[in-house]
Amino acid sequence: MKIHEYQGKELFAKYGVPVPKGGAAFDVETAVRVAESLGSWPVVVKAQIHAGGRGKGGGVKLAKNVGEAREHIKAILGMNLVTKQTGPKGRLVKRLLIEEGCKIAKELYLGILPDRETGMHLIMASAAGGMEIEEVAEHSPEKIVKVFVDPLAGLLDYQAREVANGLGIPAGAMKQFLAMLKNLFRLYVDYDASMVEVNPLVLTADDKVLCLDAKVDVDSNALYRHPDILAFRDIEEEDPHEVEAFKYDLSYIKLDGGNVGNMVNGAGLAMATMDAIKAAGAAPANFLDVGGGANAEKIANAFRILLSDPNIKGILINIFGGILRCDTLANGVVQAAKETKLSVPLVVRMEGTNVEEGRRILRESGLPMTTATTLTDAAQKIAAAVK
Amino acid sequence: MSIFTKEPIRLIVQGITGKDGFFHTQKCAEYGTNVVGGVTPGKGGEKAGDWPIYNSVREAKAATKANATMIFVPPPFAADAIMEAAEAGIELIVCITEGIPIMDMMRAKRFIADKKVRLIGPNCPGIITPGEYKIGIQPGFIHTPGGPIGVVSRSGTLTYESVFALTNAGYGQTTCVGIGGDPVNGTNFIDCLEAFNADPKTKGIVMVGEIGGNNEEKAAAYIKANVKKPVIGFIAGITAPPGRRMGHAGAIMSGNSGTGQGKLKAFRENGIVVCENLGDLGAIAKTTFK
């Protein structure tokens, strides 16, 4: 789960990781008051959306006085911010972070994430701050310092020094940097972060370390033990269908430009079903994995979410029953199709655990639907139906 | 013949009293797996069906001489269950549980690293040697005993699709392993490829991957260097958009790494026969395995 920069900085402050003085605001007058309350100029006005590249998109501006601050606040709040990460549709800015400016001597990059290949924590740091780490990795990988941290031992002192030395931290800032890194690592572990990124991390003219940005993503599997992170959730940043799916514990992702809704059990099969729909000449409108532990009610909710997308011209259900039994699936489909008065073509393909019982339930329901035998057969039938 | 197991299986089930846990325990037993008991803390001394329940894996092992476990424990407690089983000396741990926090799994993986244990999963369908035993949630009837094909897959239901296609094309299976869709897991493609390559009954291999990470690329290089048997490869998620997590925590493409096209390219460059549409697997098997 993503959280906003200002929320990440709240966590940083709580953990003793230095961030600039500042505050969040959701309207112009509050934002101006925050700017004035900082007590020094310039201040920085930063758009808060769940996407990077905000500066280049015009969502971050420096103000030398209150007049400029008000001007920038009015311009950014309510703007449609288009960045490399938002896609061409952009994102409406509803929240701001107002911060004091600082004299930057050097910009650095610092990130911590779980490394899937080794099963270790990975600290990545680079003296080429401000740039995207992917670019640095591609063009000058030797500029990236990588330190792997054993999950049982935690971050060791010498490893923290390795990061500092790799970044060329000056002696005057060393003590503060090491404390910052240890605190940041503690935060990353405590909050089950799937990524903590500070870009840029700056050295100021007076040799202080300061995090000008804070990106914290939290492992959604671990949210059950982080109620304070759940409270940070901003559903306006999410697709309404995905918000609805989240409520029912469904794994749903909306895909742009699709016309075939599909419901599948298992993430791999769901992806393969999307691929098959595309190969058959139609376009998948979503990814939807109902999961292994689905019950009839969950299936019914999944069905409703699919049908609430007006672009959908047909639905393909592809279930290979393992932990999810075909009879459970069939009961859910029948219940949902009756409740929602299904009005688009439906193709069902089912195999696996309790498949005979599942097929019987569908057959005896009297619902209008086409059955299919294989994945290719199912994809071709739904593609023909939506043409 | 099965990879990863030698002696007769004596299986316990951690989380046997849950609805899914009990259902699939029964299904495994019906398939022929020797289930000897279960573990649910606080329910020791009771029974699940005819199976005795123990409070801990250590107790269960002492009483039943179990050498394998199947884990259905809910995600907040599943990593602990893995470590408990490893510490008790269970050699084969199959973790079905989906949704374990990644940091829990990192600790568990590190914890078991120096122990003599094979962890399959988590977030996986399990392992099956058709006609002999299954440890997992696979629908048994889609499999065909006797080989000669080994199947390894990151996805549960995709494994079933592949196995069913092989069965329908007339190919039985030696062992089918679902290694799971999580980014940090116990057994990877290369572990399975190595075992299949060494298994005399296995004459060909089907490898089912998906977008995200670089395990498929590494496996492809391994195959070119080491595997002497024909391999068919499939990748799910070719049409998935980048930067979005497709259900499996591991299935996310970031930047230029983990893309479907990159994986297919790695397959082709390393002599793996690519199956682009899973519906064609049966036909491709007929020309590849002969």
Image: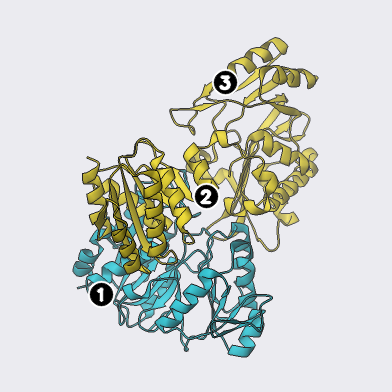
Q: Nearer the viewer, mark 2 or mark 3?
A: 2
Q: Which chain is cyan?
A: B
User: Looking at numbered disc 2 in the image, what kind of residue is underneath it?
Assistant: Tyr
Residue B232 occupies quadrant: bottom left
Q: Residues within 10 Å of mark 2 (few under 14, many from 20)?
A: some
Determine the CA span between mark 1 and mark 3: 61 Å
Task: Between residue B226 and residue A265, name the one nearer to us.
Answer: A265
User: Decide: marks 2, 3 in contact (CB < 8 A)?
Assistant: no
Determine the CA span between mark 2 and mark 3: 31 Å
Q: In this picture, is A244 found above or below B196? A: above
Q: Is residue A46 visible?
A: yes
Determine the CA span between mark 2 and mark 1: 40 Å
Q: Is residue A363 left or right of residue B13?
A: left
* Residue bearing the label numbered 1: B171
Q: Which chain is yellow?
A: A
Q: Chain of mark 1?
A: B
2 and 3 marks on the same chain: yes
Q: Secondary structure at mark 2?
A: loop
Q: Residues within 10 Å of mark 3 (few under 14, many from 20)?
A: some
* Residue bearing the label numbered 3: A78
